[in-house]
Structures are given as C-alpha cells and as structure tokens.
Amino acid sequence: MFRPRRAVALVACLAVSLFALTPVRAAAAAAKDVVQEPGREIPVLYDVDVVVIGGGLSGFGAAVGAARTGAKTLVVERTGYLGGWLRGSGLGNVLAIKGWRPSIEEGVLADVAKKLVALKAEGYPDLETVKKDGQFLVTNHEMMPQAFQEIVEESGAKILYFSTYADSIVKDGKIEAILVQTPVGRAAIRGKVFIDCTGLATVAAESGAPTKKAEAFMGLASWIGGVDVPKYTEWLKTRPKEGSPELKKWLEDKIQHKLTYFSSTGGGPDMMNYPWDDWWERNSGAYGEAFKAAVEKGELPLYYKVGEKGIVSIIEGIKPIQFELFGGVARPRTYVVGVDPTDIKAVSEAHAKSAQLLFQYTAFLNKNVPGFEKAAIIRLADATIPRAGRSIESNLFDDAKENINPPADKPAKHDDVIAILQRGEKRGAYEVPYGAMVADKIDNLLAVGKSADGGIKFRTHMLAVIMGQGAGTAAAVAVKDNVKPRDVDIRKVQAELRKAGIPLPEKKEQAAAAKTP
Ligand SMILES: Cc1cc2nc3c(=O)[nH]c(=O)nc-3n(C[C@H](O)[C@H](O)[C@H](O)COP(=O)(O)OP(=O)(O)OC[C@H]3O[C@@H](n4cnc5c(N)ncnc54)[C@H](O)[C@@H]3O)c2cc1C
C-alpha cells in the first residue's frame, strides 16, 4: 500500500510493517532484501466515478455496466486490447455455451452478438444464426476485442491501454487513487469506486483487503497452422479408439497416476493432480504408441517440472479444425499444475517450459501424425495464466457452503442475486450473489469473476461478463446515491439489470410491490 508524500519519513521507519500488508511485500521482507521506494509526486491522469482495473471479460462487462448506469467510467488495461484471456491467453475460444446461462441474449452479451454480425465475423452472417448457435466460436482473435472496444466506447466509458495497476493509495479504509505504470512513467487515477477485474484479485491484495489463494490449473495456448485436416481425419479413421492396456500401464507407471475417463469424471479433483485422463481418452489411440517411442528415445519429454510441485504437460487441443480464414489449425494447450500464480518467478518458468514443450510437441506431430507434416506453430498466447488462483475473502459470502451446480429441482437462491449461472439444462440455476463481489476492509472495492470470493467457481467466461455488468451497475448506483458499495440498494441494482436485459427473479417484496396498483 503506497503512502502519500507527506509520509515519506514514516515510510522509512514503518517499512517492515507496511510491507507486511501485501503478499508481494511480505515475500520481499521475508527475503530480507528490500529496497525502499521513495515518496514522489505522481500526476493524476483521470478523476472519475468508477475505475475498472483489468479489461478482460469481467472488466468489459463492468465498464459497460457502470457507464450505462450514468457513472463516469475508466477501464485500465495493461495490454492494447480488451478481452483478456479470451484473446490473449485463450487465443480465441468459445464465449457462451448453448443451453447455459448467462446466455448470449442477456445483457451486454446481446450487444456482443449484434456487434459480431456488424463486424462480419466468420460464421455469423445474421443475428438469427448467432442465436441459433447459442455461442460465439471466436475463430479470429482480433474480432472479439474489437467488438468489446466499440461497445465500451459507445457506452461512454474511457479506455486506458498499456497501463498496469501497480499500487493503491488507501486512506481510512478507502482507495483514494490507484497508481499505474505506463510505458512513459507512473500515473495516478482517482475514483470513487474501484472494481478489481485483474483475474487475480491484485488490487484487493495490494490495497489490504483480505484475499485467499486456491490451486487452479494454468495453461499456455497455441495455434498450429498448416494442418491438412482431411488427411488427418482420414488417417484417424484407421486408428483404434484407445491405446492398448500395455500402453496404459506404461503411462500409469511413468506418471504414477491411475488413468480414468475424463468425460465420465468431468475432470474432477484428480484433474488438479494429474491431467492425463483427458490425453488418454482423446489421443492414446491415435498416436499413443508413437508418443511412447518418442518419450523413450528422449525426443519428447513427458512433462517438465517447475520447482518442487509444478508440472507442465500437454493434454488437449490437437483435434484440428478447418477454418475458412486460417485453413487447418490445431490448438493445443499446456496444462500447468502445482504452480502458485502469484509467484512470478515460477509463473515465468512455467511459461518458458510451456513454450518449449509446445514446440517439441509440434516437431513430434510433424514426424508422426499424417496431416501435420508441414504444420508449424503460428501463434503462442501472450501469457500462461490460471483459471483462477487468488480471490477476495468477503464476509458477505461463505464459499464453503456454496454449490454452483445445484440439482435441477433445487435451484440455489440468493436475495442479492445479480446474475444466474446455469451449467446446462440438467442442472439447477445458481443465483450469483452480489455479496461475493464485495471486498472486506476496503470500503470502495468490488471484485469480479475469478477475483470475486468463490474464485474458480465464478470463472465461467459468460458469467464473468454478466457479473462484471452487475458490479459496474452496482458501483454506479452507489456513486449516485453516495453510499458504500456494501450498502447499495440491491433492489435498485436488480431493477437496473432487468432493464439492461438480464432476467433476474423478482424477490418477494418486489413481486408484492409490482401487484400493488
Ligand atoms: C487456460 C485456461 C482455460 C480456460 N478455459 C475456460 C473454459 O473452457 N471455459 C470457461 O468458462 N472459462 C475458461 N477459463 C476461464 C477464463 O479465464 C475466464 O472465463 C476469464 O478469464 C474471466 O475473465 P476475467 O476478466 O475475470 O479475467 P482475464 O480474462 O484473466 O482478464 C484479466 C484482465 O486484466 C488485465 N490485468 C491483469 N492484471 C492487470 C494489472 N495489474 N493492471 C492492468 N491490467 C491487468 C489482463 O491483461 C486481462 O485483460 C479458462 C482460463 C484459462 C487460464
């Protein structure tokens, strides 16, 4: 937590206790090698109502929600595009899933649908086709960020690119301003409410709000271009569905993990320990024997280790797709487990090893898999990032008690619902509570998606957008009514969200009020 200039002398004396407030500084202090940052005057670049930090899916929703509800809004993003993981780390992927909620007809997702049609995105000639599809399969990485940027700008919110959140100036339990590092030096941004959309609760942690960490697997995505898809598909037809029992035993011995079926477990906790089940199911029949031979000859590592517990391995995404624009493309991703996403040295090592493994894997495919002879990596994602990892700890939400997959006949209700998560028709609806986004100890801070309490539970991409819209809307209502986000009139927020096209259930007294003439 940064202290204003006046306090420079104090900073020197209190260095250790101040450092103890944030994880990065606690680690630095523990290392007994620290430098003291001198106080200095920082120019204020913006003074707004709502500051959204992180322009990923959560940040996109938050910025539009706040601006459309009348707040002067700024979104601060460290890269030069909006969309975060979806573009930079997922390299284009699916946004929304047919039969799930939030659907593409809700809130700002409906604007994305219209924008993709206007931008002539591949596969979306008209709105009817988009609706029928029920999802956006983003084949072109550049399309979605452009849609997000146009929608944010049309909402009246401003975007500040190339600016990395660095610190908060906190006074009396409130963030007065944040400091950002730009390519041309530091700048300050003042605001009334701050929304942490960094995906790692970085603003919360650095501002002194309680946070917690949970293991969540990371990944580095890539695109392998130049794949002859028809040739690969024909070859695949000649291959067995699954590898032999001997191959299975060989792999189990190597990885010391009993292989099961990914599709029947849906991943599950085992996935965290060793994610080879998916690999076995999808790839063992196709090229398992060649894989074993390459590993035995030392041409391909089975996995890389990172530190004591970290593992980098590849298990998914080889199945190539024929795109109109790009031709035949396979999209393998590494799986990284056992790496603390807040340990930057370990993350950097995992990223380097992921890239190394992806290149080695491609060389293996060139040699052993028909259709891949001329294939090459044409893009590596910008970052190896976690599906979650650090989130706020709100005293308005009890993570341990929450089941986001309730049975179909027993939906999970919350009075302060701001979005509905429903993972397919066979599962019940989960009412996502506003309380999960309200930071403790810092009065004017909300956190969305992976940064919200619940972390990985709320990572689902379309939910991140709609949760963001909920947080942005609540922040704007709080500013208008001059109350803390914690004390905001949730009925007003819910009414605004309904107006914005997010169908939320009417709570008791609302239903009664609606009936009263
Ligand atoms: C490998 C992988 C696979 C996934 N697969 C799926 C899937 O199949 N289905 C699914 O529903 N979800 C999936 N997810 C989850 C996906 O990450 C989330 O849906 C999405 O990232 C949530 O968006 P977000 O905005 O919260 O975070 P992010 O997309 O991570 O966005 C965070 C944004 O904040 C910016 N930022 C971070 N720190 C700073 C800073 N200090 N200053 C300024 N800007 C900053 C980043 O540049 C980024 O733009 C996957 C995630 C990963 C990592």
Image: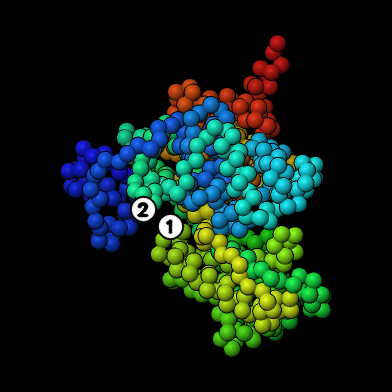
State the count of labels.
2
- State the residue position of label 1: 342
Whether residue 152 is visible, yes or no, is: yes
Check the image and report above or below for 270 versus 244.
above
Residue 369 percent across, percent down from the top left: 71, 79
Mark 1 Cα within 10 Å, few/some/many (few <14, many 20+)? some
Q: Is residue 432 left or right of residue 208?
A: right
Does the Cβ of the disc 2 residue fall within 8 Å of ligand 1?
no
Identify the residue shown where x is 61% and y is 52%.
142
Q: Residue furthest top?
A: 517
Of the image marks 2 and 1, the number of the one nearer the N terminus? 2
Q: Is residue 159 left or right of residue 126?
A: left
Closer-to-camera residue (517/192): 192
Closer-to-camera residue (216/502): 502
Closer-to-camera residue (56/204): 56
Real-space CA distance between mark 2 and mark 1, rounded to the nearest whole angstrom: 9 Å
Quadrant in the rendering for residue 514: top right
Q: Is residue 246 left or right of residue 159?
A: right
Check the image and report above or below for 313 versus 174.
below
Label drawn at residue 287: none
Secondary structure beneath disc 1? Answer: loop
Residue 135 percent across, percent down from the top left: 72, 48
Whether residue 167 is visible, yes or no, is: no
Identify the residue shown where x is 31% and y is 35%.
171
Label drawn at residue 23: 2
Identify the residue shown where x is 50% and y is 28%.
71
